[in-house]
Image: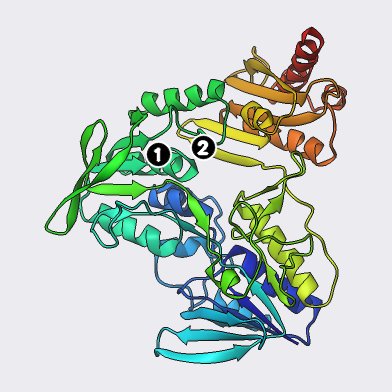
Amino acid sequence: MRIVVVGGVAAGMSAASRARRQNPAAEVVVFERGDWISYGACGLPYVIGGEVQERRTQGNHVPESTLQDVPDDEFGVLVARTPDQMRGQGVSVRLNHEVLGVDARAATLSVLDRSSGRTVQEPYDRLLLATGVAPVRPDWLPDTLQGVHVLRDIPDAQGIEATLRGGAKRAAIVGGGYIGLEMAEALKRRGLSVVMLEAGPEPAGRMLDPVNRRLVREELERQGIDLRTGVTLEGLSAKDGRVTGVQTSAGRVRADLVLVAVGVRPKVELAQAAGVRLGHTGAVRVNASQQTSVAGIYAAGDNCESLHRVSRRRVHIPLGLTANRMGRVAGVNMAGGEARFPGIVGTGIFRVFDLSVARTGLTQQEADSYGLKAVSADVKSSDHAGYYADARPIWVRLTAEQGSGRLLGAQILGHGDAVKRIDVIAALLHSRASVHDLEDMDLAYAPPFSSVWDVLLVAAGKVKKVMREG
């Protein structure tokens, strides 16, 4: 059996490893168009901001490969497995090999060796498309202009680093989602003045309900970020091939570094060429075994839809754990085993300077848009006993279904690891638990960690009160 994987990052390498383990007799080949495989793209803002290097010099343990095939670059610390390591496991990794087309009838791929310029046909018995996502590029964004960047992979990050080392002083970030928010902190840490331009009324618009978006805004402004909302972008200004500013509906913003972070789109061109069915989100539609609509072709990772276990709808929420888990499932099934992807509940977490933000399930706005009869309650408390040193505020919004009390989602904002309480709600969502189940839970208590009535229990009681009154 010849198993071919297109894409060598999270889903692709997880699938390759698991397929080889499932069927040691199988030939497993990975084609990666770039120079890097199996790295933590989520860590890119923290390398750019200098935090990873700081923690290493402070003696904190950061896993790092010492093999010779890791490029000599500060981003190498993010590499989990190198090509040599994968080859040692019996997986053939071919870097700088771009798959140009798929012939599903002949079960072959057209592959360009970007080093030699030679194109060859490669056969497969099972094929995995793990092509990920690409940053959305607005029509006004030029293909080549020094100082203008997106951030999705290590080469993107290397380009940003080159601009920073070239003396950039003023940054304009277009978009207030995950990448924009994390990079605002990273660039501020590097000494730049930062303007964030957001078309919506608040940052984090797709992640939080309005009551919590304002907390994100307040933290950005407290940290000196010039946040401008309700602004549309019209173009860039440049001189001698280098960006000098951003033209907006509210005027011009001077900048010698522009980061465009307005979203991502699933890379589905190969899937479409193979006749694979796409879902309503524009991502590849797969079943629980990660099989596509075309026999012998699987898909996994950020280019795929997932089943949302709360809304029971198919969604496109590209996140790291989802990609890795999908890859494992695909690898087992391609190699002859049986595994199923259980779906997601939309759990995410990020940091904005000193504010940590987490969410899972549905927001109130999302529940309303799906026609669910939902209620929410907001609680502000302290992340541990108020009389204990360094108690800090924590905000919880809990959302449940009116009548049944079924938990629909939660948002938690606070400081440090306190917001990891979100995992309690995520676990309950997977089992379709109710707010009554949450209120009855035996949660850990000690003054350095929580109040005797943890904020989640308080929130559960408040939601029940709102339900009774409603």
Crowd around label 2: few <14 · some 14–19 · many ≥20 (10 Å): some
* Disc on the earlier residue, 1 or 2: 1
Q: Is residue 249 above or below residue 342?
A: above
Image quarter of the N terminus: bottom right
Question: Is residue 172 among the parts visible in the rendering?
Answer: yes
Image quarter of the C terminus: top right
Q: In the picture provided, is 285 more to the left or to the right than 47?
A: right
Q: Residue at position x 55%, y 73% from top?
A: 82
> Residue 237 location, x and y as percent?
18, 48
> Residue 7 location, x and y as percent?
57, 71
Q: Is residue 182 above or below residue 15?
A: above
Q: Residue at position x 52%, y 71% from top?
A: 66
Asked which secondary structure carries label 1, the reply is helix
Which dot marks residue 312?
none
Most foreground residue, 239 or 415: 239
Question: Is residue 57 among the parts visible in the rendering?
Answer: no
Q: Is residue 444 above or below residue 173?
A: above
Most foreground residue, 427 or 78: 427
Asked whether disc 1 touches disc 2, contact meaning CB atoms under 8 Å apart, the reply is yes
Asked which secondary structure carries label 2, the reply is strand
Most foreground residue, 108 or 378: 108
Q: Residue furthest left?
A: 240
Q: In the picture provided, is 437 more to the left or to the right than 172?
A: right
For marks 1 and 2, give the CA distance.
Answer: 9 Å
Amino acid type of the residue that numbered disc 2 sits on in the rendered structure: Arg
Q: Is residue 421 above or below residue 305?
A: above
Amino acid type of the residue that numbered disc 1 sits on in the rendered structure: Glu
What residue is shown with label 2? 351
What residue is shown with label 1? 185
Crowd around label 1: few <14 · some 14–19 · many ≥20 (10 Å): many
Q: Quadrant of residue 462?
A: top right
